[in-house]
Image (cartoon, rainbow, N blue to C red):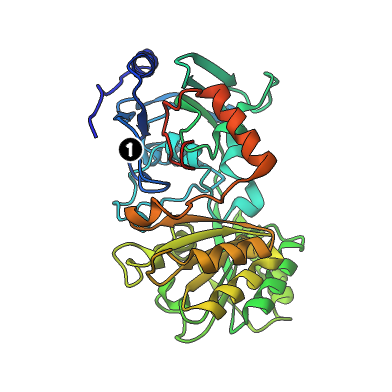
Amino acid sequence: MPEVPKPRSAADVEALVRWAIAEHKSLEVVGRGSKRSIGRPAQSDATLDLSGLSGITLYEPEELVLSARAGTPLADIETLVASRGQELAFEPADYGPLLGVRAGQGSIGGVLAGNLSGPRRIKAGAARDHFLGFSGVSGRGDTFKSGGRVVKNVTGYDLCKLMAGSWGTLAVMTDVTIKTLPKSETEATIVVQGLADAAAMSAMAAAMGSAYDVSGAAHLPARIARQFLADFPAGQAVTAFRLEGVEPSVKHRIQTLGAVAKAFGPPAMLDTARSRTLWRAIRDVLPFAAHGPLGARPVWRVSVAPMRGAEVGHMISAAGSGEIFYDWAGGLVWAAMPPSDDAGEAVVRPAAEAAGGHATLIRAPVAIRAIVPVFGPQEGALAALTGRVKDSFDPTGVLNRGRMWAGF
């Protein structure tokens, strides 16, 4: 696929999109390429590489706001805000190792375009909830803006919510503004061992319904738990609850939440270092990493109501030999399925839909992603609405054609 000149400014992006429209070309929009293999294979004539649009343009720690060009490495942003005692509270996931790319290569624009959120989503919200504003170029070749540089603003339609999760199919974001928040002083994790999946869902629901401000809840079945933290006992499932904040508060809440957890089994505590290692492995799906023992397997991401996570996991396990674990208190089910012609779709998607959720194929060979729907198929009124939105922003299909659905 040919490259077009790498843009260095928003004006360059507008010029290149207008060129593509005039020449009846389509563009694959790429930030820094770490998530390029998520979605259907590119059906584009040229690649629009945004890595030249890099740099933090505004950071006001007192106002909890940061603006950057869309191609800015996420690692640069996280380093800067950490130096001021802040963080991106939605805990952006790094899928690089999962997809066979070196860790730390993603861009802020790519994270927002994919709406990628880590374990803290159950407390802090998704990436879209921290997305304050952006500038971009639509598939019509028009530059436009939405939102602003303050946490509270009223500027008409909240297009940030629309762009988050659109995977570059509606517009090329050139500049983005996000919210930052104070970073927790410390953290610790309570673990309960040996719970079956259904019992773990009840334990996580109890923890999330408590007054102890749990910022992470995950269940790691026995067959895979030790791949998250090497000193976990072999053959024992692990259910984990993370607490963050100032040290006196964390100590107090560890004790009180431990009393709640005791109803499900004897609780143990992970210190700050072990806790951070565990939650990074959960956030980045490291046991399913491309260079690990499960690296040849297709990987699915299933979103469902938390109390129905175990139902999805049971259906997947009963139908095959998929390896699974649960994040978001059971609301996010990760499944690594045995290699097959359909990447396990015949098992995973019906399980997700039966529980009222949806499934996304995150990793699979190109040939499979060309024939198996990566994102959930749309029908009827929803498909019509999606088509009208696409036509409004990109009527000729210039941007990331076919990445989410064939012909879209």
- Residue 362 at what x, y percent from top left? 44, 55
The one nearer the camera, 54 or 386, is 386
Q: Is 31 placed left or right of 163 in the picture? A: left
In the picture, the quarter occupied by the N terminus is top left
Which residue of the protein is positioned furthest toward the bottom in this rendering? 235
Q: Residue at x 55, y 73 (%)?
A: 316
- Residue 149 at what x, y percent from top left? 58, 22
Q: Which residue is mark 1?
A: 32
Q: Is 185 placed left or right of 108 in the picture? A: right
Q: Residue at x 70, y 69 (%)?
A: 257
**Residue type (three-letter) at the residue carrying disc 1:** Arg
Residue 339: quadrant of the picture: bottom left
Q: Residue at x 47, y 38 (%)?
A: 167
Q: Is residue 276 visible?
A: no
The one nearer the camera, 171 or 290, is 171
The one nearer the camera, 388 or 81, is 388
Q: Is 361 placed left or right of 304 in the picture? A: left
Q: Is residue 231 visible?
A: yes
Q: Is 83 placed left or right of 165 in the picture? A: left
Q: Residue at x 63, y 47 (%)?
A: 124
